[in-house]
Image (spheres, helix red, strand yellow):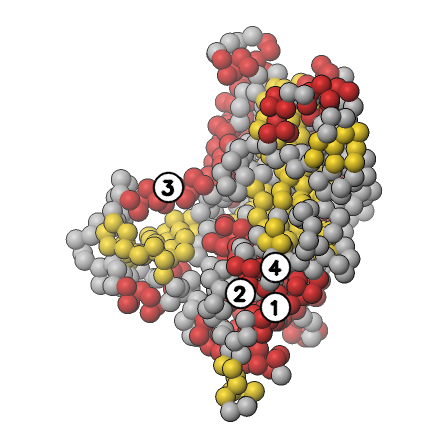
Amino acid sequence: MAVRATVGRFPIDPDALESSGVPWGVTLTPFAARDENGNPPLYGSDGHLLPRCENCWAYYNTFCEQEQWAWTCSLCGTLNGLPSEAVSRYSRPQSCPENTSSFVDLELPMEGNEEEAMQARPVYVAAVDLSSSEEFLELIKSALLAALEALGPGSLFGLATFSHKIGLYDVQGPVPVVKNVFIPPDVDDTLPMELEDVMPLLSFLAPVETCKDRIASALEALRPTNSWERTTAAGQGLDGVLLGGRGFGLAMDALFNYLSSEYGSTFALARVFAFLSGPPDFGAGQLDTRRYGEQYASKGEDADRALLPEQTPFYKDLAAVAVQAGVCVDLFAITNEYTDLASLKFLSIESGGSLFLYSNTDDSTLPQDMYRMLSRPYAFNCILRLRTSSEFKTGHSYGHFFPDPQYEDVQHIICCDSYATYAYDFDFANNVGFSRHTSEPPMLQIAFQYTVVVPPEELLNSASSSPSRNKYSLKRRLRIRTLQFGTARNITELYDSVDPEAVLSILVHKVISASLEQGVREGRTLLHDWLVILTAQYNDACKLVQYDHGSSTAARIDIALSQCPQLQPLPRLVFALLRNQLLRFHEEGVHPDYRIYLQCLFSALEPSSLHRAIYPLLTSYATPDKQAFPRHSLSRAALITSGSPIFFLDAFTTLIVFYSSTADPSLPYPPPHDCLLRTTINKLKQERSITPRLIFLKGGQDDCTSFENYLIEEQDVDGSGFTSMMGFVSFLEEISQSVIEYMK
């Protein structure tokens, strides 16, 4: 459980918070195996016996004062009695994890029938779009074959297809059999029969270890529905145009209801992989993609605002059905046509799944992403609760979860892997703030209750073929992290404790929220104004503003924040964020689906990864085996002045190796597999939550536009002439002028 605060020392009171200009909050990666310093939790049992405060319900922890029969809550100061079993346990404090570590992971007893509750089989269902091309299906086949290799024995797998009909595959017999049910074209109609009546669910869900070959055969047999089939099913439009044939909405609804009958008995979590080659355009849940196009010019609508909200509540409502059925949805859109991910995204983000977008099949990393996603551990049926000491409280919470309808500050997460990150910002509970003379510093406690699937012991110890080898066990656990923070005695102490990457995370969440509610323009304005205010507050607090001859217009502003190393990265990060496609204007050629994809990706990344995605790291190499400089600014000037022949750019989703046109021809190209540069690349790829694309470019020979587009600090790099395209130096000058205006 990694926790990163925007400031290591909290502001002392609301005035200090206001005058600093720095957002106050934390980012949280609850299922990370270690904390932000690399320390693992202390494991133990009997989590249900952990004492809790009668007033605020916080858990007993190492910061609590303990007497023989009582303990004082470190968050709210309440004196609580200790039950007799706790008294005897705590008479041997070293035997209890909660007495020796503030970061613990404790086993909980399973609820309900012990035998049933402890047994489960992981369930995975692929839903494949047949209203697609041969190339699309070839990519999906490769991805699902990779997925089958990642799934452990005991897993159940189901293959379904959708177009103008839903296909269910039974792969447990000698020959794969598909049964179809037609989707009615009307948006208000439902399926003529339940999927359970088409094929019993346990015929559809096949054991992977015994049916892998037959699943592969079924995949090989997948073919796109031809245009005659689709036209016949959908009917012709008045002008002879095909009305549609991708009945995605009703297919998902039917699948969730199909699976829900076995939720809690056959499976505790089912994952549905939905593969789309275009927008749903048939039956219930069809989307009108005509809203993307030239109509904005005639209607005078703000495209940046109109394409961000969902056009129908259908998929948000459907996400609630998935959650109730214990289903996590991973959505894979492989298309360059407008698919309206603004409407579809709720299926994945509210069910704890991921949203992937690939613009084409040629260089798609889908098979690697599938394998990577299924190979890493994940928790499910999670409950996340953040508690604070009484002087402050949580303001907004951000991330891919759904809030508890009854309890404040409680979030439910259907599926959570070790990368999934959430964020909170804080407010003071009153005008007093933290007392300057007390021994009770600010406290934060995170409780994360979750379930994991544990493989059978036989699989770990031997190649036993006993019947029990298929039985996976469920373990319920409670992970608790309690943190104590200092307070800043003055503004300098607060600025010196800033974590710029955590600040960037909170800012990204805030501008995404502003964009969704009020449009991209408003998100950009919020970010720009924040940097102006921070710079003004910093200059004012450090008493740095100098006026030439009493003229405020000639005031010299320290725009580089040079007296505070922790603040110095922020202007560059804000500049890069304003240049990112997340916040570029619609008329600059940003595809609305790509913007939604970035929103979903960025709002789940931990701070260091987000930093890399917003402001890529550019390093240089003298040879493939020798690094020259560890970091360059993103400008052509940096390339020229360094004199290095090889550059490596890490932009999180893309890795580029660039050989300059002046590089010695004797340098091996591309770099050999056993060199330092390749080792660095392989290590980065292993650590990523998604598979980055790797590109090799040679200056003077290849089209290097993809590399040059990342050199954002140049003045008007792409020649587009948009005002947002100013270089970094011009940007700082513009901010400086805005600060002078603000401080007048």
Q: CA distance from mark 2 to mark 4?
A: 28 Å
Rendering coords of residue 334 (x, y %): 54, 48
Residue placed under numbered mark 1 in the picture: 530
Q: Earlier in the sequence, mark 1 or mark 3?
A: 1
Of the pair 443 and 586, the residue shown nearer to us: 443
User: Mark 3 or mark 2: which is in front?
Assistant: 2
Labelled pair 2, 4 in contact (Cβ < 8 Å): no
Tell me the kind of residue under disc 3: Asn
Residue type marked 4: Arg
Nearest to viewer (mark 1 / mark 2): 1
Single out the mark in the foreground, 2 or 4.
4
- Callout 4: 10 Å neighbours few (<14), some, many (20+)? some
What residue does disc 4 label?
A: 489
Query: In the rendered structure, which amino acid carries the disc numbered 1?
Result: Trp
The residue wearing badge 2 is 574
Give the mark, 3 or 2, whose residue is nearer the N terminus. 2
Name the kind of residue labelled 2 in the image: Val
Earlier-in-chain disc, 1 versus 2: 1
The reply to whether discs 1 and 2 touch (Cβ–Cβ < 8 Å) is: yes
Q: Nearer the viewer, mark 3 or mark 4?
A: 4
Q: Nearer the viewer, mark 4 or mark 1?
A: 4
Q: Nearer the viewer, mark 1 or mark 3?
A: 1
Q: What is the CA distance from the residue labelled 4 to the residue labelled 1?
A: 24 Å
Q: Name which residue lies at 59% across and 9% down.
A: 467
The dot on residue 682 is 3
Q: Earlier in the sequence, mark 3 or mark 4?
A: 4
- Please rate how many residues cluster around mark 1, counting C-alpha atoms within 10 Å: few if below 14, some from 14 to 19, many from 20: some
